[in-house]
Image (cartoon, grey):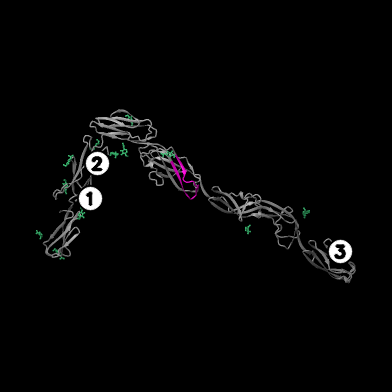
């Protein structure tokens, strides 16, 4: 079945079978059922799918069913045809014709016929795979003699079942001869302002009546067809537009104009800052690159460098930050002053950095091998930024009378360069003043400039060599713990060594009889001090003998002796009021009581006390009268 798209399709299905359960007929997705059980089912549907099927199904009982189907071919009566023309690749054809066929169905054979001047030029059958659109391309030449030609394409659907359809015809295109074999070499020329140029022109035409160059500046040479050359010693005319032409016998003329780009590097390229304020860290600033008297400015690209690294490439044409001068768009103005603006947020590290801009021509593959360019002198940025203090220790120990705050390694950075100032407890300090031991403490260094201020605290300890301020004589008691005598001053705390009679002395406590000349030596990293003094070790009196009993005969003589040790030397006193025959005397450390011709009254206890300023002690001696014999 072949049926046109959009029309109604009527179909029916009948059966001789009398005993069946269901009979149905589907046209595409429209399904109808036999309701009367008379063995006939009919259905009507609008054709739209290009691939459509009619299918009749009969169900006999639970297990048996059968079906019968037909393919339906849908066609479209009038496909659309469109002819377009474009210039061909000169080496292949003058023109390219393209015949587009839309809405073609079914996906079957179509015949395509090209007509040139109402005559069949080319005809072929083609079976289309993809039904929506198909394209056929044809290259054609139109000779100089022919001058012009008319073209159209026709498309016809062809398949056996259907009567031949009317062909669908495109519009007719009227095309003229395009080339008459004139070539200029090179076709694209880049000439530096003031340089020489030369262009050859040649033709393949044999019967050229005249062949020459037309020009305002320069000259021709070798004016003998088919080769003519135009040349100039010094090209300085921006309006230069020479063209080569041939005139044929028929008075027809053909021209070929080479594309000449006369370029001029700028007179100068200069970077300057926009605005008159100093650059400040964190602020946005602009640098402007002025490019004076350049052509063609349209082909310039501007590169910005900082420290020899590219930071921006500005295509003058598309730039939205660059004010585009009129000369860029006015084709009659050749030399142009243009500028590029580089906007950036100023960083501290930009201080002293050289910024440069470079104007470079972008001519493409036919241009000079090395793109002509010109760079500016560097612009050195001066950036103002707030101070910092570095290398400043938090803790520092200096030596008395030699250290001054100025000796600290603290350094400031900032622009304008800040000075460092020192404060102690809010008071400005002369940083060249020598510090004394009383001046340890927390000092504050500050640095400020127009951009801000920074403070830093330094804990300063003023150190000094050991020093004694001690007596020449010390008195201690034996019982005293080894109490610190004669402590030196000094920072860091000095180490102390004791000497007695020139020898190191390590005693941990005072000993009797150890009085004498001592010296103390104190050292720290800043020096040593020594002090000599007499150490008097005091101890209370003590008798050399315990209490005793001594006998004497009547009329005999006896001496009772008390001897005491002690520092200072003790004084011995005996309490008795002495009888006539008793005498008391002191000899050295001894107290001696002498009894001469003893009587009974002399018997008894003699008690003496030894005293010095740190104590006293008592000792008794009992005198017993003995029988004679
Ligand atoms: C085919 O017919 C349907 C229904 O009339 C219509 O919607 C559709 O556009 C037609 N297709 C073509 C390619 O003409
Ligand atoms: C189906 O219907 C057609 C036309 O009406 C008729 O010619 C044909 O004999 C019928 N077939 C059966 C099996 O009834
Ligand atoms: C279904 O019909 C077929 C053909 O008439 C017959 O051979 C078959 O036995 C039937 N099956 C049942 C379950 O009736
Ligand atoms: C023309 O076609 C030739 C051959 O296919 C190709 O080498 C050449 O690049 C084409 N030229 C252009 C301008 O397309
Ligand atoms: C057109 O002319 C060129 C040059 O003479 C030739 O190479 C090419 O094959 C021609 N093309 C056609 C489609 O005739
Ligand atoms: C082609 O035929 C049309 C219609 O008959 C006519 O107008 C036209 O001039 C003819 N073109 C050529 C080149 O013969
Ligand atoms: C397509 O064209 C070929 C060759 O002319 C022909 O044999 C074939 O039958 C055609 N097919 C249809 C569907 O018309
Ligand atoms: C122009 O032609 C001359 C002579 O044939 C030749 O020497 C010269 O190289 C050619 N110049 C160019 C640019 O093709
Ligand atoms: C000169 O340039 C124009 C535009 O780019 C181009 O259409 C033309 O073919 C060029 N001329 C030559 C001789 O190459
Ligand atoms: C470019 O600027 C310079 C200096 O301002 C001026 O002398 C010159 O005429 C200007 N050139 C153009 C083409 O405007
Ligand atoms: C610091 O100054 C305050 C007030 O000026 C004073 O009370 C304080 O004693 C000072 N401290 C020192 C360590 O000088
Ligand atoms: C202690 O030193 C003094 C003075 O140098 C000296 O006169 C004295 O004899 C010394 N005493 C002793 C016990 O060395």
Q: Quadrant of the C terminus?
A: bottom right
Establish if 597 lies above or below 235. below
Of residues 583 and 492, the one drawn nearer to the viewer in this rendering: 492
Q: Is residue 270 magenta?
A: yes
Q: Label 3, secondary structure: give it.
A: strand
* 45 to the left or right of 457: left
Decide: few, some or many residues near mark 2? Use Cα within 10 Å; few <14, some 14-19, many ≥20. Answer: some
Magenta stretch, overall SS: strand
Which residue position is annotated with label 1? 132
* Residue displayed at 83% across by 66% down: 573
Q: Are marks 2 and 1 in contact (CB under 8 Å)?
A: no
Magenta-drawn stretch contains 356: no
Quote the CA–CA distance across marks 2 and 1: 22 Å
Which secondary structure lies at badge 1? loop
Magenta-drawn segment: 269-290
Q: Which residue is mark 2?
A: 96
**412 up-or-down from 19: above or below:** above
Residue corresponding to mark 3? 585
Q: Considering only order in the chain, which callout, 3 or 1, is on the residue closer to the N terminus?
A: 1
Please tell me which residue is depicted at 39% across the width and 34% down the height of the picture: 193
Q: Determine the quadrant in which ligand 5 lies.
A: top left
- Callout 2–callout 3 Cβ contact below 8 Å: no
Q: Position of residue 301 (x, y in %)?
A: 40, 42
């Amino acid at each position: 079945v072949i049926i046109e798209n959009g029309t109604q399709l009527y179909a029916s299905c009948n059966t001789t079978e009398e005993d069946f359960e269901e009979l149905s007929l589907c046209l595409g997705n429209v399904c109808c059922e036999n309701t009367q059980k008379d063995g006939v089912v009919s259905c009507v549907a609008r054709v739209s799918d290009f691939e459509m099927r009619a299918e009749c199904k009969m169900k006999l009982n639970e297990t048996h069913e059968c079906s019968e189907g037909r393919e339906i071919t849908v066609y479209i009566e009038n496909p659309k045809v469109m002819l377009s023309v474009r210039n061909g690749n000169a080496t292949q054809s003058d023109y390219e014709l393209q015949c587009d066929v839309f809405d073609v169905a079914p996906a079957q054979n179509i015949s395509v016929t090209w007509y040139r001047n109402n005559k069949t030029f080319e005809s072929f059958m083609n079976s289309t795979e993809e039904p929506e659109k198909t394209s056929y391309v044809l290259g054609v030449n139109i000779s100089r003699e022919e001058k012009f030609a008319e073209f159209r394409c026709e498309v016809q659907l062809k398949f056996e079942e259907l009567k031949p359809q009317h062909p669908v015809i495109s519009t007719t295109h009227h095309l003229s001869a395009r080339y008459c074999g004139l070539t200029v070499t090179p076709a694209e020329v880049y000439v530096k302002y003031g340089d020489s140029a030369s262009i050859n022109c040649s033709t393949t035409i044999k019967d050229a009546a005249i062949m020459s160059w037309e020009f305002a500046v320069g000259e021709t040479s070798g004016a003998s067809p088919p080769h003519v050359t135009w040349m100039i010693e010094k090209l300085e005319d921006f309006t230069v537009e020479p063209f080569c032409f041939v005139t044929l016998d028929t008075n027809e003329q053909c021209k070929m104009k080479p594309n000449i780009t006369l370029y001029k590097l700028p007179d100068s390229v200069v970077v300057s800052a926009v605005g008159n304020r100093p650059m400040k860290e964190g602020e946005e600033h602009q640098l402007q690159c002025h490019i004076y008297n350049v052509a063609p400015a349209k082909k310039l690209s501007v590169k910005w460098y900082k420290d020899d690294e590219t930071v921006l490439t500005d295509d003058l044409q598309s730039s939205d930050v660059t004010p585009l001068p009129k000369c860029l768009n006015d084709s009659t103005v050749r030399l142009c002053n243009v500028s590029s603006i580089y906007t950036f947020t100023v960083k501290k590290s930009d201080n002293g950095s050289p910024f440069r801009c470079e104007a470079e021509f972008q001519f493409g593959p036919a241009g000079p091998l090395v793109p002509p360019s010109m760079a500016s002198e560097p612009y050195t940025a001066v950036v103002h930024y707030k101070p910092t203090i570095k290398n400043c220790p938090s803790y520092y120990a200096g030596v008395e009378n030699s250290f001054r705050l100025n000796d600290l390694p603290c350094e400031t950075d900032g622009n304008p360069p800040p000075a460092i100032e020192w404060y102690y407890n809010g008071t400005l300090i002369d940083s060249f003043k020598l510090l004394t031991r009383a001046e340890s403490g927390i000092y504050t260094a500050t640095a400020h400039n127009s951009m801000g201020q920074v403070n830093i605290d330094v804990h300063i300890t003023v150190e000094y060599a050991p020093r004694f301020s001690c007596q020449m004589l010390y008195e201690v008691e034996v019982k005293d713990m080894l109490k610190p005598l004669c402590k030196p001053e000094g920072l860091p705390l000095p180490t102390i060594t004791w000497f007695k009679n020139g020898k190191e002395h390590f005693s941990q406590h005072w000993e009797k009889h150890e009085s004498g000349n001592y010296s103390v030596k104190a050292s720290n990293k800043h020096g040593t001090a020594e002090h000599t003094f007499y150490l008097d070790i005091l101890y209370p009196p003590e008798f050399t003998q315990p209490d005793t009993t001594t006998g004497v005969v009547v009329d005999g003589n006896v001496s009772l002796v008390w001897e005491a040790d002690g520092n200072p030397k003790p004084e011995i006193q005996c309490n008795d009021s002495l009888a006539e025959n008793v005498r008391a005397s002191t000899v050295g450390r001894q107290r001696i009581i002498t009894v001469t011709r003893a009587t009974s009254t002399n018997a008894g206890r003699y008690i003496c006390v030894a005293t010095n300023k740190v104590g006293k002690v008592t000792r008794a001696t009992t005198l017993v009268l003995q029988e004679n014999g």
